[in-house]
Amino acid sequence: MDIKQLKFLIALDKTRHFGKAAELCHVTQPTLSMRLRALEDELNLVLVARGQRFEGFTEAGERVLAWARTMLAAYDGLQAEAANCSGQLVGKLRLGMVPLASLNPMDLVKPLIQQYPELHFELLSMSSEQIIDGLSRNQLDLGLCYLDHINTDHFEAIELTSTSMGLLHDARYFQFDQAELTWESLNDIPLGMLTRGMHYRQSIALSFRSRGLDPHPKLESDSTFQLIQAVSAGICCAIMPLQVGMEALNDNLRMMPISGAHTAAPMGILMRRTEPRSALAEKCFEEARSIFAPGNA
């Protein structure tokens, strides 16, 4: 068994396709299949359900896959630890983020890149539940999510402020004279919203319900990008976080503050407390603590 076989297994889980997994690993499909069969022979287990195409993992395969993720994370952590002992910070920081976060991730990524040019970043849009699960399984290094229901025995957290909200609109299609909007004034405006069940959407729904309002969104999506596209097309307006620069994406977008609008829970940056925990995650977490300390954020 070697580390490449584990990478092949994880790539197959990520792509759910032999050809795409081989492409991701920069090998041919026959090579990937051969190495996975060799792993199965060594373990004396069938890991992959095969037919005309990839059909999933067997029960044993799922269990081995969980160990493969842990071992690969430990391997990456070992490399980062060795580099850290030499005064370097290298590797890939895996950062899970909830959509429509109040924090612009570039406020963290840019200073880290400037200070540690050998760092690489993987930014993933996920729900808070997925982020917590990813941190617990060591599939993520850091997470940016809402802090309600967070068990501080398992995670360290840098608490940020609650997300303030405004109305993103395209000035070619919508104009507002007032300096600040009320929730009541939004009830009859065509709105684009994140899909139901997402934390940001829940905060918006709670604010409307607490005022006896029940708007019906013109468009729903789990993609921030698609919401911005809909706003730019004049289909709707969207309730978005303030101070993350969305209105700067094109010359026609404007952001109007909403009175008393903020998410129901504060947001924070999370890191798991338990080992294995890479030096890269620890260092970037401490850098984040410095960057977003009161008075700096």
Image (tube, rainbow, N blue to C red):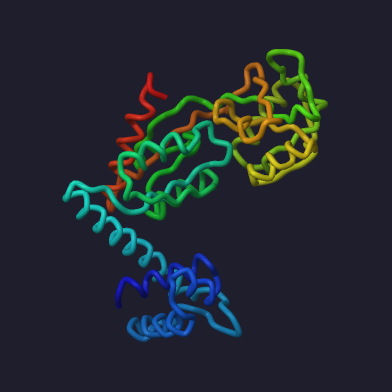
Up the image or down, 272 lies above or below 176; here it is below
Residue 258 spot, x, y in % from top left: 66, 20
Residue 280 spot, x, y in % from top left: 29, 47
Residue ID at (47%, 46%): 96
Up the image or down, 273 lies above or below 237; here it is below
* Residue 287 horizontal side relative to residue 230, left or right: left
Residue ID at (39%, 82%): 35
Residue 191 spot, x, y in % from top left: 76, 33
Quarter of the rendering occupied by the N terminus: bottom left
* Residue 110 horizontal side relative to residue 223, left or right: left
Q: Quadrant of residue 158?
A: top left
Up the image or down, 228 lies above or below 50; here it is above
Please identify the residue farthest to the right as the structure is shown: 188
* Residue 158 horizontal side relative to residue 199, left or right: left
Please identify the residue farthest to the left as the structure is shown: 86
Residues 64 and 30: in front is 30
Residue 154 spot, x, y in % from top left: 35, 43
